[in-house]
Structure formats: C-alpha cells, structure tokens
Image (cartoon, rainbow, N blue to C red):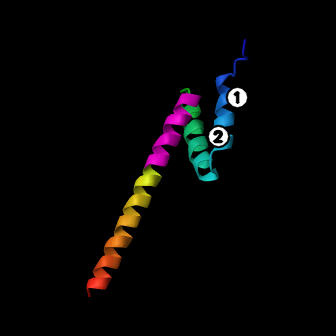
Amino acid sequence: MGATIHDERYSSMILMSLPDSYVTYLETLADAAIGSGCMFTAHDIISKATELTDKQQLRASLTQSNQKSSAFQASES
C-alpha cells in the first residue's frame, strides 16, 4: 500500500516544480486566501498554474501573430 501525501506537502512539491514567476504569483494568492480564512489547496494551485500557462501561451501566440503581421506589412511597403 502506498503512502499518503498530505495536501500541504503536495502543494509544496507542486510549487517547487514550477518556474519562479509562477511561484511568486501562487504564493501571493495562497497568502491572501489564508489571510481571509479560506483554504488554498493543491487543487487550487494546479488550477491557477494551468490558467497561467494558458495565458502565457495565448500571449505568445498573439505576439507571434502580431510579429508575422508586421513583417508582412513591412514587406508590402
């Protein structure tokens, strides 16, 4: 039978595996939640990390699209 990992330890493991930019944001959210008396679980960390990843990918896609559009417009001139 496997050992159970408690939520706090699991949350720490997740945070340690993420880039520093994520950790700062997620720790701030966790501190705010805890300060207001709410629980901030490992599930919450994973959900927010996924949202951050989606936003970064969208921004990168938009930036790449804008760069291609600018290059196309410059070549038409």
Residue 40 shows up from this direction: no
The picture places residue 8, in percent across and down from the top left corner, at 67, 27
The picture places residue 63, in percent across and down from the top left corner, at 40, 65
Q: Is residue 4 magenta?
A: no
**Residue identified by numbered label 1:** 9
The picture places residue 40, in percent across and down from the top left corner, at 56, 30
At label 1, the amino acid type is Arg
Could you say which is closer to the camera, residue 75 or residue 37? 75
Residue 66 shows up from this direction: yes
Single out the residue that lies furthest toward the bottom. Answer: 77
| Residue at 68%, 22% in the rendered image | 6
Marks 2,1: beta carbons within 8 A: no
At label 2, the amino acid type is Leu
Q: Badge 2: how crowded within 10 Å, few (<14), some, or many (20+)? A: many
Q: Badge 1: how crowded within 10 Å, few (<14), some, or many (20+)? A: few
Residue 58 in the image: above or below residue 73: above
* Main SS category, magenta section: helix
Q: Which residues are magenta?
A: 41-54
Q: Quadrant of the C terminus?
A: bottom left
| Residue at 35%, 69% in the rendered image | 66
| Residue at 59%, 52% in the rendered image | 21
The picture places residue 57, in percent across and down from the top left corner, at 45, 53
**Residue identified by numbered label 2:** 15
Single out the residue that lies furthest toward the top. Answer: 1
